[in-house]
Image (tube, helix red, strand yellow):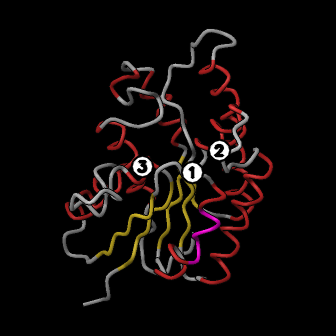
Amino acid sequence: MKPAQTILFIGDSITDSGRTQNDGAPLGRGYVQLFADLLTLRKPQEEFRIINKGIDCNTIAHLLSRWSDDVIENAPDVVYILIGINDATRHLDQSRSLHSAPDDFAAVYRRLVEETRKRLPHASIILMEPFFISKGDDIEGSYRQRLIVLLQDYIAATRSVAAACHTGLIKLSEIFTHLVAQRNSAFFSEDKIHPTSAGHLAIAEAAYRALPHGRNRHV
Protein backbone atom coordinates (compact mmCIF):
# COMPACT_ATOMS: atom_id res chain seq x y z
CA MET A 1 0.00 0.00 0.00
CA LYS A 2 1.23 3.52 -0.83
CA PRO A 3 2.14 5.72 2.16
CA ALA A 4 -0.67 7.98 3.29
CA GLN A 5 -0.88 11.36 1.56
CA THR A 6 -0.62 14.26 4.01
CA ILE A 7 -3.09 17.12 3.56
CA LEU A 8 -2.66 20.11 5.86
CA PHE A 9 -5.03 23.02 6.50
CA ILE A 10 -3.84 26.22 8.16
CA GLY A 11 -5.60 29.47 9.02
CA ASP A 12 -7.60 31.24 11.70
CA SER A 13 -10.74 30.41 13.73
CA ILE A 14 -12.67 29.31 10.64
CA THR A 15 -10.14 26.53 10.15
CA ASP A 16 -9.63 25.94 13.87
CA SER A 17 -13.35 25.40 14.56
CA GLY A 18 -12.68 24.10 18.05
CA ARG A 19 -9.77 21.80 17.28
CA THR A 20 -7.59 23.53 19.90
CA GLN A 21 -10.17 22.78 22.59
CA ASN A 22 -9.54 19.65 24.59
CA ASP A 23 -12.67 17.84 23.41
CA GLY A 24 -11.28 15.02 21.33
CA ALA A 25 -11.80 16.69 17.96
CA PRO A 26 -8.29 17.20 16.51
CA LEU A 27 -9.71 18.24 13.13
CA GLY A 28 -12.21 20.63 14.70
CA ARG A 29 -15.93 20.58 14.01
CA GLY A 30 -15.89 22.58 10.79
CA TYR A 31 -14.86 22.26 7.17
CA VAL A 32 -11.63 20.32 7.82
CA GLN A 33 -13.54 17.47 9.47
CA LEU A 34 -16.18 17.60 6.73
CA PHE A 35 -13.43 17.50 4.09
CA ALA A 36 -11.97 14.41 5.78
CA ASP A 37 -15.41 12.79 5.79
CA LEU A 38 -15.92 13.57 2.09
CA LEU A 39 -12.52 12.13 1.27
CA THR A 40 -13.29 8.93 3.16
CA LEU A 41 -16.63 8.54 1.38
CA ARG A 42 -15.38 9.30 -2.12
CA LYS A 43 -11.94 7.68 -1.94
CA PRO A 44 -12.38 4.81 0.55
CA GLN A 45 -9.54 2.84 -1.04
CA GLU A 46 -6.93 5.54 -0.37
CA GLU A 47 -5.10 6.44 2.83
CA PHE A 48 -4.86 10.09 3.89
CA ARG A 49 -3.35 11.91 6.85
CA ILE A 50 -5.32 15.10 7.53
CA ILE A 51 -3.82 17.82 9.75
CA ASN A 52 -5.59 20.93 11.04
CA LYS A 53 -3.30 23.80 12.06
CA GLY A 54 -5.91 26.54 12.32
CA ILE A 55 -5.61 28.84 15.35
CA ASP A 56 -8.28 31.26 16.53
CA CYS A 57 -7.59 34.99 15.90
CA ASN A 58 -4.58 34.40 13.62
CA THR A 59 -3.46 36.82 10.92
CA ILE A 60 -0.98 36.35 8.07
CA ALA A 61 1.86 37.46 10.39
CA HIS A 62 0.94 34.71 12.86
CA LEU A 63 1.17 32.16 10.07
CA LEU A 64 4.62 33.48 9.14
CA SER A 65 5.78 33.08 12.74
CA ARG A 66 4.72 29.44 13.02
CA TRP A 67 5.11 28.27 9.42
CA SER A 68 8.28 26.21 9.92
CA ASP A 69 6.86 24.34 12.91
CA ASP A 70 3.30 23.86 11.74
CA VAL A 71 3.72 23.41 7.99
CA ILE A 72 7.30 22.63 6.91
CA GLU A 73 7.94 20.17 9.74
CA ASN A 74 4.85 18.16 8.77
CA ALA A 75 5.99 17.95 5.11
CA PRO A 76 2.47 17.97 3.61
CA ASP A 77 1.77 16.81 0.08
CA VAL A 78 -1.03 19.39 -0.11
CA VAL A 79 -1.43 22.56 1.95
CA TYR A 80 -4.59 24.69 2.02
CA ILE A 81 -4.36 28.24 3.38
CA LEU A 82 -7.35 30.32 4.52
CA ILE A 83 -6.41 33.68 6.03
CA GLY A 84 -7.26 37.37 5.77
CA ILE A 85 -10.48 38.25 7.59
CA ASN A 86 -8.67 39.11 10.84
CA ASP A 87 -6.16 41.27 8.97
CA ALA A 88 -9.08 43.12 7.38
CA THR A 89 -11.07 43.67 10.58
CA ARG A 90 -8.03 44.79 12.57
CA HIS A 91 -6.90 47.11 9.79
CA LEU A 92 -10.38 48.64 9.63
CA ASP A 93 -10.41 49.01 13.44
CA GLN A 94 -6.91 50.55 13.39
CA SER A 95 -6.05 47.94 15.98
CA ARG A 96 -2.62 47.65 17.56
CA SER A 97 -3.00 43.87 17.44
CA LEU A 98 -0.80 42.05 14.95
CA HIS A 99 -2.09 42.44 11.40
CA SER A 100 -1.06 43.53 7.91
CA ALA A 101 -2.36 46.16 5.49
CA PRO A 102 -3.33 44.74 2.06
CA ASP A 103 0.04 45.39 0.38
CA ASP A 104 1.98 43.91 3.29
CA PHE A 105 -0.49 41.03 3.43
CA ALA A 106 0.33 40.17 -0.18
CA ALA A 107 4.07 40.41 0.43
CA VAL A 108 3.98 38.10 3.45
CA TYR A 109 1.65 35.69 1.68
CA ARG A 110 4.00 35.48 -1.29
CA ARG A 111 6.92 34.84 1.06
CA LEU A 112 5.06 31.92 2.66
CA VAL A 113 4.38 30.37 -0.73
CA GLU A 114 7.93 30.87 -1.96
CA GLU A 115 9.46 29.43 1.22
CA THR A 116 7.17 26.43 0.97
CA ARG A 117 8.14 25.86 -2.65
CA LYS A 118 11.82 26.05 -1.71
CA ARG A 119 11.61 23.71 1.27
CA LEU A 120 8.85 21.38 0.07
CA PRO A 121 9.12 21.36 -3.72
CA HIS A 122 6.76 18.37 -3.97
CA ALA A 123 3.90 20.12 -2.16
CA SER A 124 0.77 21.43 -3.85
CA ILE A 125 -0.38 24.79 -2.47
CA ILE A 126 -3.99 25.96 -2.57
CA LEU A 127 -5.02 29.44 -1.43
CA MET A 128 -8.56 30.07 -0.24
CA GLU A 129 -10.01 33.57 -0.41
CA PRO A 130 -11.19 35.31 2.76
CA PHE A 131 -14.91 36.06 2.69
CA PHE A 132 -17.77 37.92 4.35
CA ILE A 133 -21.05 36.03 4.05
CA SER A 134 -23.48 38.84 3.28
CA LYS A 135 -25.77 39.94 0.49
CA GLY A 136 -23.70 43.14 0.40
CA ASP A 137 -26.65 45.51 0.78
CA ASP A 138 -25.56 47.01 4.10
CA ILE A 139 -26.20 50.71 4.69
CA GLU A 140 -23.55 53.01 3.19
CA GLY A 141 -20.97 53.97 5.80
CA SER A 142 -21.90 51.18 8.20
CA TYR A 143 -19.12 49.03 9.67
CA ARG A 144 -20.15 45.99 7.67
CA GLN A 145 -20.32 47.94 4.43
CA ARG A 146 -16.84 49.37 5.02
CA LEU A 147 -15.50 45.90 5.87
CA ILE A 148 -16.94 44.45 2.66
CA VAL A 149 -15.21 47.17 0.64
CA LEU A 150 -11.88 46.73 2.45
CA LEU A 151 -12.00 42.95 2.22
CA GLN A 152 -11.94 43.22 -1.56
CA ASP A 153 -8.31 44.38 -1.25
CA TYR A 154 -7.41 41.23 0.69
CA ILE A 155 -9.26 39.05 -1.80
CA ALA A 156 -7.40 40.78 -4.63
CA ALA A 157 -4.11 40.25 -2.78
CA THR A 158 -4.85 36.54 -2.41
CA ARG A 159 -5.67 36.26 -6.10
CA SER A 160 -2.53 38.16 -7.09
CA VAL A 161 -0.32 35.82 -5.05
CA ALA A 162 -2.04 32.77 -6.53
CA ALA A 163 -1.52 34.11 -10.05
CA ALA A 164 2.09 35.19 -9.52
CA CYS A 165 3.11 31.97 -7.78
CA HIS A 166 0.94 29.63 -9.87
CA THR A 167 -0.84 28.07 -6.91
CA GLY A 168 -4.34 26.70 -6.70
CA LEU A 169 -7.07 29.19 -5.78
CA ILE A 170 -10.52 28.65 -4.28
CA LYS A 171 -12.77 31.67 -4.77
CA LEU A 172 -14.78 31.30 -1.58
CA SER A 173 -16.06 34.87 -1.78
CA GLU A 174 -17.69 34.11 -5.13
CA ILE A 175 -19.06 30.81 -3.85
CA PHE A 176 -20.77 32.48 -0.89
CA THR A 177 -22.00 35.40 -3.01
CA HIS A 178 -23.77 32.88 -5.23
CA LEU A 179 -25.21 30.97 -2.26
CA VAL A 180 -26.59 34.01 -0.42
CA ALA A 181 -28.28 35.14 -3.63
CA GLN A 182 -30.42 32.00 -3.28
CA ARG A 183 -30.87 31.74 0.50
CA ASN A 184 -30.83 33.96 3.59
CA SER A 185 -27.22 34.65 4.55
CA ALA A 186 -27.90 33.43 8.13
CA PHE A 187 -28.26 29.92 6.70
CA PHE A 188 -24.51 30.04 5.99
CA SER A 189 -23.30 32.30 8.83
CA GLU A 190 -24.92 34.04 11.77
CA ASP A 191 -22.20 36.68 12.20
CA LYS A 192 -21.20 36.79 8.50
CA ILE A 193 -17.66 35.59 9.30
CA HIS A 194 -17.92 32.21 11.05
CA PRO A 195 -19.79 29.65 8.93
CA THR A 196 -22.69 27.50 10.07
CA SER A 197 -22.54 23.78 9.34
CA ALA A 198 -23.90 24.52 5.85
CA GLY A 199 -21.25 27.18 5.32
CA HIS A 200 -18.52 24.79 6.43
CA LEU A 201 -19.87 22.17 4.06
CA ALA A 202 -19.61 24.63 1.17
CA ILE A 203 -15.93 25.20 2.00
CA ALA A 204 -15.29 21.47 2.40
CA GLU A 205 -16.80 20.69 -0.99
CA ALA A 206 -14.78 23.43 -2.66
CA ALA A 207 -11.61 22.14 -1.04
CA TYR A 208 -12.39 18.60 -2.17
CA ARG A 209 -12.96 19.75 -5.76
CA ALA A 210 -9.62 21.57 -5.71
CA LEU A 211 -7.66 18.57 -4.42
CA PRO A 212 -4.95 17.70 -6.97
CA HIS A 213 -5.29 14.29 -8.61
CA GLY A 214 -2.18 12.16 -8.43
CA ARG A 215 0.55 12.37 -5.81
CA ASN A 216 3.04 14.19 -8.03
CA ARG A 217 0.80 16.86 -9.48
CA HIS A 218 2.25 20.28 -8.67
CA VAL A 219 -0.11 23.17 -8.06
The residue most toward the front is: 96
Viewed as shown, does residue 5 lie left or right of 47? right
> In the rendered image, which residue does mark 2 sit on?
87
Q: Which residue is at a point 23% across and 61% down the rendered structure image?
A: 42
In primary-sequence order, the first of circles 1 and 3 is: 1
Q: Which kind of residue does numbered mark 2 sit on?
A: Asp
Q: Does the magenta stretch include residue 60?
A: no
Residue 137: x and y in percent read 57, 13
Instruction: Give the extent of the magenta segment.
Output: 63-68
Mark 2, Cα crowd under 10 Å, few <14 / some 14-19 / many 20+, is many
Viewed as shown, does residue 183 lie left or right of 98? left
Q: Which marked residue is nearer to the observer: mark 1 or mark 2? A: 2
Q: Which residue is at a point 41% across and 70% down the rendered structure image?
A: 7
Secondary element under disc 2, as helix, strand or loop, is: helix
Marks 3 and 1: in contact by CB < 8 Å?
no
> In the rendered image, which residue does mark 3 sit on?
206
> In the rendered image, which residue does mark 1 sit on?
83
